[in-house]
Image (tube, helix red, strand yellow):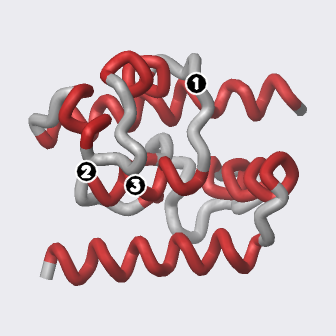
Amino acid sequence: MAARIEAFYPELGARIQSVRNRRGVTQQQLGLRLNPPNTRASIANIESGKQRVLVHTLAQIATALEVTIEDLLPPGQSDRGANLETSSATRLTQELENKLKIPKKDIQRLTSQLQAQNERRNA
């Protein structure tokens, strides 16, 4: 089980890097948009899967890149209607619940708030 969770981070990091590059944002710029600010090296470690990402940091990264958390999850794994037991979104939720002891309802609330912010920004 742990190996499967750990495999999630390089996939997530690659997706963050891809979106960041498409947006024309440097690692340094992305790090400075977070609160507290992260170093360029920290963003590089996240993108390479060497550093885990806390839910509030993932939410901030999504906001800084003007995307949803789902947009940062590996392609094909966060599709609506996909098998939730094997999706990256579910794995992320499970990890947040188990390791950080964040209740599922709070994770859903954070995700909903972030989506609403992104929708208002893109409107």
Mark earlier in primary sequence (3, 2): 3
Nearer mark to the viewer, of 3 and 2: 3
The residue where tag 2 is placed is: 65
Tell me, yes or no, whether the two marked residues, 3 and 2, touch with CB atoms within 8 Å: no
The residue where tag 1 is placed is: 51
Secondary structure state at the residue bearing disc 1: loop
Figure check: 43 above or below 94: above
Mark earlier in primary sequence (1, 3): 1
Identify the residue shown where x is 24% and y is 59%.
66
Please rate how many residues cluster around mark 2, counting C-alpha atoms within 10 Å: few if below 14, some from 14 to 19, many from 20: many
The residue where tag 3 is placed is: 60
Disc marking residue 10: none
Figure check: 64 above or below 48: below
State the image coordinates of residue 75 (x, y, percent, origin top left). Answer: 44, 44
Mark earlier in primary sequence (2, 1): 1
* Quadrant placement of the N terminus: top right
Q: In screen coordinates, is 52 left or right of 37?
A: right
- Give me the C-alpha separation between circle 3 and circle 2: 8 Å
State the image coordinates of residue 23 (x, y, percent, origin top left). Answer: 14, 42
Secondary structure state at the residue bearing disc 3: helix
Identify the residue shown where x is 71% and y is 58%.
93
State the image coordinates of residue 4 (x, y, percent, origin top left). Answer: 78, 30
